[in-house]
Image (cartoon, grey):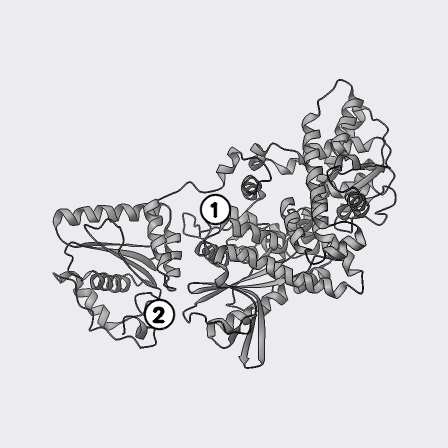
Amino acid sequence: MIRSAVEKIEQITKEKGFIYTFSFLVANSLFYDPEQVADIDWHSRLNFQELSFLAGIMLKNTINLDCILESDCQDQFERAHLAFRELHDAFMKPSMEHLQRALQSDQRESQEQFGQLGPVGDSGEAMAESVFYGDAGGYDFQFLDFAIKRYEQDNQWIRKHKGFNVQTAVSVYRELKNLHTRQHLAIRKSTDFNAFCKAALSIFCFSSQDLATCPVDEVQSILKSFSCVPGTVNEELRLPGEYNKFVSHPLIKLEADLYFVPVLFNLAQSIYESPFYWMGQDKDYRNVSLKNRGEITVDLSMELIATVFDAKNVYKQVVLEKKKGETLTDIDLLAVKGNKAVVFQIKSKKLTSLARIGNVENLRKDFHNAVQEAYDQAIKCRDAILNQTAKLINSGGNEIQLDDSINDVYIICLTTDHYPAIAYQARAFLTKKPGNPNPITISIFDLDVLAYYLKDPFEFLYYLRQRVQLYDSFMGQNEVELLAYHLNQKLYPRKDEEGRSINFVLTEGMAQLIDAHFPSVRGDQPATKAMERLHSKWNNPEFQEIIEQLKKSNQSGFTDAIFYLYDLSGRGADQFIAEIKNLKKKCLEQRKGLRFHMASNEGRHGICYVCDFQNDGKLFRHVTEYCVIKKYQMKADLWLGFGAMADSKKNVELVMFSADPWQEDSQIEELSRKYYSKSRPMNLHTRQKLGRNDPCFCGSGFKFKKCHGK
C-alpha cells in the first residue's frame, strides 16, 4: 500500500505544470495567521515532511515552467491530497492493529501495553510512521541561533573550504524568510489564472539580487552549498525516510539565477546540521571538528541549564571516583538544587536512513547509541550519588560536596540533533531494571523550551518528578506536548468515577499552545491573543507567597514540601488559604489558640495549621506536637505543618515537614488517644528518641544531631 501511494505521488509530479500546483499546496499548508496557530487542523494540510518528500520526488525529473489549466491544477491538488491520505493510512495500519490487540485484551493487559509500548507498538512499520509524521524537532530560529554557537570554533574551516561564514548563512535565511512573507502578502487573486499561477510560484522564488544586503561572494558560495538541480538528484528515492537531497539542499535551481525554495525550514535545519558532515569528510580536520562539537555541545547545554539552576549549582564533565585514580564513570552535566539532582548525559547521534524507513535492527542500534548507553551510564551515576559510594570531581579537579540529604536524581538523556519519535522508541526499546526510574529523552531544542518556561529550579525539578512518576499515565509525541499540558492543566494523576487511573495520549493540539506563544516571546513573530491560552489562569498570590517563603529558606529538605504545595495548587490551595484566614479571625475573636488539618482522600498525606493567640514562645512546640500527632493518626507518609500568631500579618511564620514513611509507634499511639483530652498542647518529649544520625523530624534536611538534637 505504501509503494502504491508513492507511485501515485510520483506520477502526479511528472505531469505538466505541477510546480504551480506544488506552490499552491505549499502556500495552503505552511502559511497561516499567527492568531489561529493554536487552532489549526494540521491533519487537513500537508506537513513539512510530506511536502519535502513531494519536492524530493519532483526533483527526480527536470522541471519546466509551462502554464497549467485551472481544471488540471485543481485535479492535481486534490489527487495529491488523496495520495498522501492513502500513504498515511498505509503507515497507520500497524499502529491500528496494535491498538486493536490492546483493546481486545483485558483491562490490566491494556494498561501494561499502554505504559510499555504506547499507541504505536514496537514494529518497524509503526515506528516509521511516527518518525515520518512526527514534529519538526525545533523552531527555525532555534536551529539558526544554535548553528552560530555550534560552529564558532569551526568558522575558519568553513570560510576556507565553503567560502562563507555561518553567520552570513543565517542572515541569508532571515532575508529569504522576510522575502517570503512580503511576496505572500503582496499576492492578489487575478481573473487570469496563468498570472495567478506565476504569482504563487513567485512567493517561493528569489535571485541573488534579492540578497544584496549580504556579501556577494558569500551569497554565491551559500547558494552553491545548499542548492540542487532538478533531474540530477534523488534517483534512488523510493520511500519516506530514505535520503532526500532536497532536505539538505532545499534551494532548487530553476534557471541560471532563479531559485525555488518551497520549504524554507529545511534550510535552517541544514545550516545547523550540514557543516558537521562537510568537516567529517576532511580527514585532517575530522577529529578537530568532533572535539569542538563535543565541547560546544556541553557548553551550550550548560548555558541553558544555568539559566534555571544558576551557574554555581551546575557542574560539567564530572568524574565519579570510587578510589583515588579509579574512575567509575562520568557525568556530562550535573545540576543540583535542594535535595534533588539532575544528571544530563549528552549524545550526538542521529536516526539513520535505514531506521527511518522502519528497519527494526537499525532502530534498536541507533536507539542504543543515542539513548540506552546514556541511560545506563546515568543509572550508575544516580546510584553512586544516592548511596554516596563515589567522590564527584569537577572539571577543575576539585571534589564536589553534595548535601547528604539528596534523595532523588532525575535522568535526562539529551541529543544534540533532532531525534524523531524518541519518546515512542524509549517506550519500545529501553532496557531497565525494575525499580529504576524512566529517563526524560529530549533534544537540545526541547531543553531550550523547557529552560524558558521552567525558569525556577523548583518548578523545573517538579516537572521532572511529575514526568517520571506519571510516565505511564501521560504520553505525548514529544516533550513540548507534555510541557504544554503541564503549563495549561498540570501533569497530575487523574481518576475516573470508580477510582481507576486514567491514561492520556496527548495530541499536537497541546503543542500548538506553545507554537502560539514561544515564537512570539522569542521575537520571531508578532504577539497575538492566542499567546494567552498557554498558561493556566489560576492564581493565588497568598499561596504563592508561602511557596516563596519555603524556597528562600535554603533548607534542602523543604524541596519535597514545595513539591507537595505544587501538588496542592488549585482548588485545594484556595481552600487552604481560606481556612487559614478564617482560623486567624476566630482565634482573635475567641482569644485562644486554634488549629485545623487537611488530609488527602487516601489519607497518605496532609497539612495542619496552628494559630496561637498568646505570644509565649511556644508556637514551635505546638506546631511540632500537632504535626506528629496528626501525621500518626492519619497514618500519613508525608505531612506539612504551618504555624503563625493570630495577630501576625503573615499567614505563615513557621513551617515543618516530614516525608518519613508511617510506622506504628506505641508511645505516639497512646499520646494520640489522649491528645484531645488535654487542655493545653502536650509535651512529646517522652516519645522514642531519634537516632543522632537520623533525618530531623522537622524536615530541614539536616541530621537530627545538627538540628533539633543539638
- Residue 186 makes an appearance in the image: yes
The relative height of residue 251 versus residue 70 in the rendered view (above or below) is below
On the image, which quarter does residue 60 sit in?
A: top right
For disc 2, the neighbor class at 10 Å (few under 14, some 14 to 19, many from 20) is many
Sequence order check: which comes first, mark 1 or mark 2? 1
Indicate the quadrant where residue 594 lies: bottom left
Please state which of residues 161 and 379 is positioned toward the viewer in this rendering: 161
Give the residue number, with chain letter if any, for mark 1: 487
Q: Nearer the viewer, residue 320 or 148?
A: 148
Q: Is residue 438 above or below residue 1?
A: below
Instruction: Indicate the quadrant containing the C terminus: top left, top right, bottom left or bottom right.
Output: bottom left
Q: Which residue is mark 2?
A: 702
Kindly identify the amino acid type of the residue bearing the numbered disc 2.
Answer: Phe
The one of 348 and 630 positioned closer to us in this rendering: 348
Q: Is residue 27 left or right of residue 582?
A: right
Residue drawn where x is 59% and y is 69% of the image: 376
Q: Residue at x 69, y 51 (%)?
A: 272
Q: Position of residue 348 (x, y in %)?
A: 67, 60
Disc 1 from disc 2: Cα separation: 33 Å
Q: Residue furthest top?
A: 191
Amino acid at circle 1: Leu
Which residue is depicted at the point 58% across and 54% down? 118
Q: Is residue 108 visible?
A: no
